[in-house]
Image (cartoon, grey):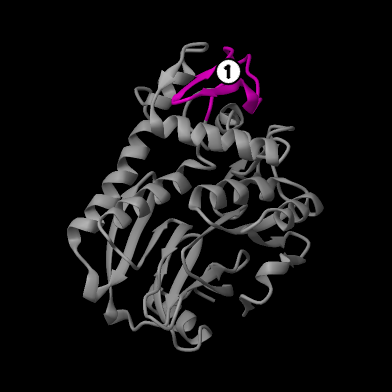
Amino acid sequence: MSKPSRRQFIQRSSQALGGLALIQATPVWAFATRAPLSDLVHRSAHIMGTPIRVSMPLASFHSAQADASFSRIQRVSDLLTVHDNGSQLMQMNSSAGRWTTGKEISDVARAARTIGHQTDGALDVTILPAMRRFEFLPGKESESYGIDFTQLQVKGQTVRMAKSGFETDFGGIAKGYAVDQAISSLQEERVKAALLDAGGDLYALGRPEPDNRWKIGIRHPNRDHDLIATIEIENEAVATSGTYVQTRTINGKVVSHLMNPRTGRPVDHVKSSTIVAPNTMTADGLATATAVMQPGAAQSLIESLPGVEGYWVYSDGTHYVSQGLKSRLKML
């Protein structure tokens, strides 16, 4: 059977959501809201290697606001990309022991260290050599390298790699930070309601209608054109990491971009990890980390964090919904 067209997917997803208007279908997410599609205005861009979309109610939309939010994301991308040897991040990587100054890089590095400690190293932003080994990032793996996020040091608004042989990739957390920066830009312009999505990392600001929250559809990890659940959110972030999102075939085996820092190899015990959190950087980092962690440890961690919820789909067919999310998550 051939795959459905995008139009057919939109129609089927809208039916699955009880006739709600489908806003977007990305590689990770589909988004829906009770507001009619004509009541929302959407602006799109492609930054950080992913589609970026901001949606706002028609009555309050101004193109300059959307453009300003995209500019914030572009700035984060330019500073923290591993695809440009001249970026601030890559300059830090090539200058072990030297302090690099910058608010964006220090904000992300500090959060990476915090989540690294919270997750016992499951989020380790010095995973770059393993990402190169499995061809998810450009460049050759160094013969002498290490993986240890504590080598990334932060002091005020300065950061450094303490020793040579360690390199940082903020791919598991920087996109969430960029979304938060874009939302801050919208709030500075007094935008009250917007949905900003960066390929699966999103923040829902306010409400699209006074009586309704934003309704988010979570993609089924085993079926490209289906949703597995929906959730309503307001002034919250949602991020998903999945082993189906980016894959490579290495020596005849399909492997995921999600790496276990302890082994330097891809994980395969989880299909998807969805986190709801107060900000997108936290949701992004914890989605990555809890996809790497073993189920019991991941679940216990999220249950212990105030304001944070989680939903996981595992490779053995089981799933888990955190206690605070059970009343808000609707399985399809």
Question: Could you say where residue 249 lies in the image, as x and y percent from the top left?
Answer: 60, 44
Q: Quadrant of residue 314?
A: bottom right
For mark 1, what is the residue? 142
Q: Is residue 325 or residue 257 the one in the foreground?
A: 325
Q: Residue at x 32, y 57 (%)?
A: 187
Residue 94 part of the magenta segment:
no
Q: Please say if 107 is above or below 328.
A: above
Check disc 1: other Cα within 10 Å, few if <14, some if 14-19, many if 20+.
few
Q: Is residue 204 left or right of residue 74?
A: right
Q: Which residues are magenta?
A: 142-168
Question: Could you say where residue 106 lies in the image, as x and y percent from the top left?
Answer: 46, 30
Q: Is residue 319 left or right of residue 33?
A: right
Q: Please say if 230 is above or below 276.
A: below
Q: Please say if 2 is above or below 15.
A: above
Q: Residue at x 36, y 26 (%)?
A: 87
Q: Is residue 306 left or right of residue 280?
A: right
Asked which secondary structure carries label 1, the reply is: loop
Residue 148 part of the magenta segment:
yes
